[in-house]
Amino acid sequence: MKRTVFLICLLLAPLAATAAGGNGQLDEVKIDLRDKQALQRGARLFVNFCLSCHSAGYMRYDRMGKDLGIPEAVLKDNFLFSAHRPGDLMKATMPHDDAKLWFGTAPPDLSLVARSRGPEWFYTYMRSFYQDEVSPSGWNNRVFPHVAMPHVLYEWQGTQQAIFHKDEHGQQHFERFELTKAGSMSPEEYDAAMHDLTNFMVYLGEPAKLHRYNIGVFVLIFMAIFTLLMYALKKEYWTDVK
Ligand code: HEC
């Protein structure tokens, strides 16, 4: 018995470790890939504000258009800023080497960032830029200290400063943000926009997920019919036994 308890504890140990170490300071975000409107808003935001520096090099514009239900004319007029044809890959406008020179580090491809870092991390990151005089760009980020990326959406969010407190060992701990200058959006509107962007980044990281949802529905319908059939069959067999 003791051995079993010990083994179960051993099996559960990694869970406890992630729960404790999994950066409890990330904010929750609800992902809904069936919300096409949200995905379209996120895509528009990404193309307008991120593609100048970052690529999403595994995605083609026309594939995205088809997946998200964006008509081709709208795609051509509103999404193709850094490309010529709908079949092009989503490449950054800024040449890689120039970006490296300007920022000290090249902006990475963002195709998989929501998978590698997680949606919560991405959502928190986009809302955690704060002013920092010591940093070369004038910005710092709570979940990405000394980040080389400037806060490209500060006109929407406004500018905020981070309040830290020191513990007895002299270590700095983040406490809260304080808005120093309001942006064009209210905090709720900005959070909603970042929710849409995060939703889009999750789609970008795994476009096949959209199709899996549809397949899932068919599988459930099939299971329901199959269960009914099996039940009928069972009843049929047991009438002979009795
Ligand atoms: C002016 C150029 C520029 C623009 C525009 C820009 N970024 Fe960045 N971004 C950077 C640079 C440079 C880095 C690398 C930061 C570092 O490593 O310190 C970066 C890093 C990131 C990272 C961290 C990636 C990782 O895993 O290390 C994310 C996420 C990100 N950017 C998201 C965005 C999003 C979303 C947008 C659009 C709203 C955007 N960026 C617009 C320059 C830019």
Image (cartoon, rainbow, N blue to C red):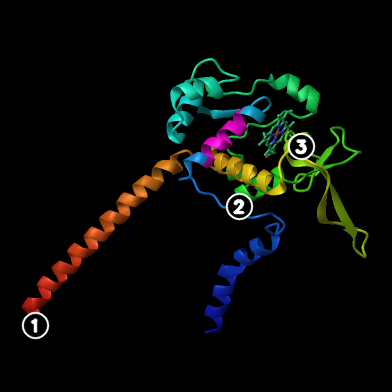
Q: Is residue 99 above or below residue 231?
A: above
Q: Nearer the viewer, mark 1 or mark 2?
A: 2
Q: Nearer the viewer, mark 1 or mark 3?
A: 3
Q: Residue 120: percent from the left, percent from the top?
A: 63, 50
Q: Is residue 51 above or below residue 10?
A: above
Q: CA distance from mark 1 to mark 2?
A: 56 Å
Secondary structure beneath disc 3?
helix
Tag 3 residue: 154
Instruction: Determine which quarter of the picture holds residue 152.
Output: top right
Tag 2 residue: 29
| Ligand 1 lies under 8 Å from the Cβ of mark 3 | no
Q: Nearest the camera: 240 or 69?
A: 69
Q: Is residue 151 above or below residue 220?
A: above
Mark seen at residue 242: 1
Image: magenta residue range: 38-47
Q: Nearest the camera: 156 or 226?
A: 156
Question: Among all residues in the image, which is located at the extreme left?
Answer: 240
Q: Amino acid at mark 2?
A: Val
Secondary structure beneath disc 2?
loop
